[in-house]
Image (tube, helix red, strand yellow):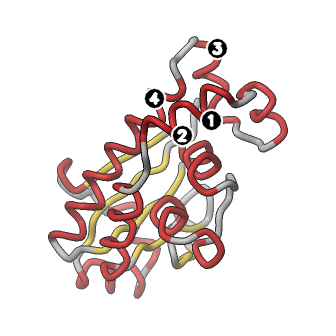
Amino acid sequence: MAMTTYFQMVSKAELDALLADPTTINALDQPEEQCAMTQLQQSLCFFLCGDAYPNPTEHGPLAGGLAGYQNVETNTLENGSFDVVPKNKCEEVADALQAVDLDKFKRRIGKADVEGLVEEEELYDLEACIADGDDLGELLSDEISNLRAFYADAAEQSLAVVLYTT
């Protein structure tokens, strides 16, 4: 079963409550319009940031939007933590996602040795896509488009984002 990264918009009060008691992350259940998800987080990070496990300090707002700016440990999630994108960073993330030239992005993926990257860069989230014969450039571009809209909405509503992979 593929790992899924869930993104949920949260208000300041909701974020403060999560930070005060991180174990409540399991109870967070925002309306569908305040949520996004991807099963291709590692690949998005690699193709957008050059690293499957990027650091926002080194890789900028794309990394921040995909992997978070603050890590919060909790034993209630199988990966042991969730990440936070503060509301003041959501606009930067939205702008960085908007600046991605999807045509160039698709061409770069089309030239990549994707099967080799699965092993070399541990992009295991691509294995099922390769097996299914999916157009990876199109698939990843669709994920970027979804995250563009999600972060633009978060910025417009002045909301933070929490994300976790399970």
Asked if labels 4 and 2 touch by Cβ distance under 8 angstroms, the answer is yes
Q: Where does the N terminus fall, quadrant-wise?
A: top right
> Of label 4 and label 1, which has the lower sequence position?
1
- Which residue corresponds to mark 4? 139
Rendered location of residue 29, percent (x, y):
27, 57
| Residue at 63%, 30% in the rendered image | 126
Give the SS element for disc 3.
helix
Q: In the displayed structure, does residue 31 sit left or right of residue 41?
A: left
Element under label 4?
helix
* Residue type marked 3: Ala
Which residue is disc 1 drawn over? 125
Q: Which amino acid does label 2 sit on?
A: Leu
Mark 4 surroundings within 10 Å by alpha-carbon count, few (fewer than 14), some (14 through 19), many (20 or more): few
Residue where numbered disc 3 is placed: 131
14 with respect to 125 (left or right) = left
Q: How far apart are marks 3 and 1 (CA)?
A: 11 Å
